[in-house]
Amino acid sequence: MIKRLCLLVLLTFSLSGCLYKMDIHQGNVLDQEQVDKLRTGMNKNQVIALLGSPQLTDPFHSQRWDYYSMSNVKNQRRKTEKLLTLKFEGTRLTEIIQAEPESAPE
């Protein structure tokens, strides 16, 4: 009887992991409304106040900031990736580049 109960509990816990998948968000999760507020000519402090600090800063290209995000949402079979690249001259924002690489299947 105890063996059956242990087996049932073990089976229940192992199957419950297969049924539920959490949403996974990595990187800078940016709202499109925030990105739309970006304007060339803004200074770095204004950009940080709006979007937060960039996830990626290249020590060799300090005038380029990259905001990368990846989402793997349950009930979808694709990962969504977004890349926002900001280029500066001095402290002023000069270029805004948005890219969405093709979504990769799981």
Image (tube, helix red, strand yellow):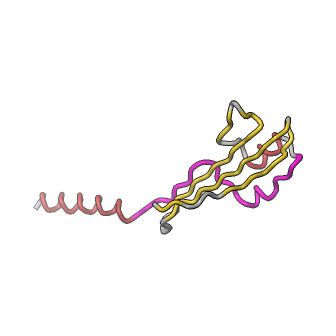
Nearest the eye: 31 or 40? 40
Nearest the eye: 67 or 18? 67
Q: Residue at x 23, y 58 (%)?
A: 10
Residue 14 x, y percent position in the rendering = 29, 59
Magenta highlight range = 20-41
Residue lying furthest top: 59
The N terminus - image quarter: bottom left
Q: Is residue 51 above or below residue 44?
A: below
* Quarter location, residue 57: top right
24 inside magenta stretch: yes
Q: Residue at x 77, y 37 (%)?
A: 63
Nearest the eye: 31 or 8? 31
* Quarter location, residue 59: top right
Residue 105 x, y percent position in the rendering = 48, 62
Q: Is residue 73 above or below residue 50?
A: below
12 with respect to 88 (left or right): left
81 with respect to 11 (left or right): right
Number of marks in the rendered image: 0
69 inside magenta stretch: no
The C terminus - image quarter: bottom left
* Quarter location, residue 31: bottom right
Q: Residue at x 65, y 42 (%)?
A: 55
Residue 34 x, y percent position in the rendering = 76, 56
Residue lying furthest bottom: 75
Nearest the eye: 4 or 25? 25
Residue 89 x, y percent position in the rendering = 85, 38
83 with respect to 5 (left or right): right
